[in-house]
Amino acid sequence: MTFHSIFLSVLMACSVTLLPACQTDTPSASTPSDTAVTTNTQTAPTDTEPSAQEVEQTAETDTTYEKDFGSYTVPQGWIEAETSAQGMYFYISESDEQKEQPDNVSINVGSNPYAAEEHDTFRQAILRQLSMQIGGQSGISLTGDGSMTENGDTLYTFTIAEEDTGITTTQYYIVGDYKFCLIQETNFTGSEQADTVAQMMVSSFAWA
């Protein structure tokens, strides 16, 4: 079973993998103990609907969304899909609306027991959980990186590449005070466009 298949199996029961010390704004089930939350790799819904919180067009090409947790920008040609759970938002290319497995980027927020300055402890917890989910499967690589966002927040990036399927999952954790924002890119095709969308959302994200 691949890493992507594990995430899809968990998705059948809940929208996020929730560990006891952390909570998100979506209903969920408990998992083995540790203190981090990761969103499942998911196939984005293909039915789209306008968001009540879509607020403005910028530079005649990009759309800025304002949610109760913060704001971020999505480039022209990518649209907000019908969400699979309250508080989690998916974005797909307009040209991919009819695809069964479109490249997609999702965003949601959660809480954790760490202050912003304890971000390294949070990073270690995420690594433990990802390693547990991969579980020694062959042909799957996990890499990580740390940096800062344009707004000065700590950013941890984890990339999971599956050799057999060609699927790449990239998780961007923007760390706040006892909270985090997770922007997750699920790339089925290897398209650089999906990378650009995720990176724009990360660089433009600002807490509410």
Image (spheres, grey):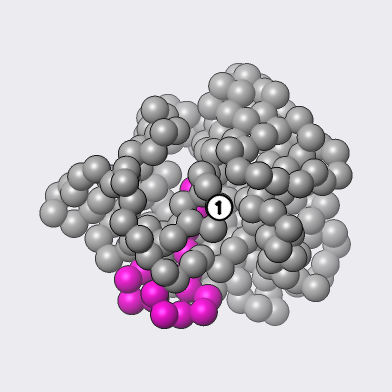
* Quadrant for the C terminus in the image: top left
Element assignment for label 1: strand
In this picture, is 76 found above or below 176? Answer: below
Residue 153: x %, y % from top left: 47, 29
Q: Give the side of residue 120 with respect to residue 51, left or right.
A: right
Instruction: Determine if the magenta segment contains residue 102.
Output: yes
Dot 1 amino acid type: Ala
Quarter assignment of residue 21? top right
Q: Is residue 77 magenta?
A: no
Give residue 3's position: percent from left, percent from top. 73, 65
State the count of labels. Answer: 1
Assign the N terminus to one quadrant of the image.
bottom right
Is there any visible trace of residue 173 in the rendered image? no
Q: Choose between 75 and 84: the one closer to the eye.
A: 84
- Residue at image location 85% in from the left, 39% down from the top: 33
Residue tagged by mark 1?
A: 85
Q: Quadrant of residue 72?
A: top left
Extent of the magenta region: 93-107
Q: Residue furthest left?
A: 60
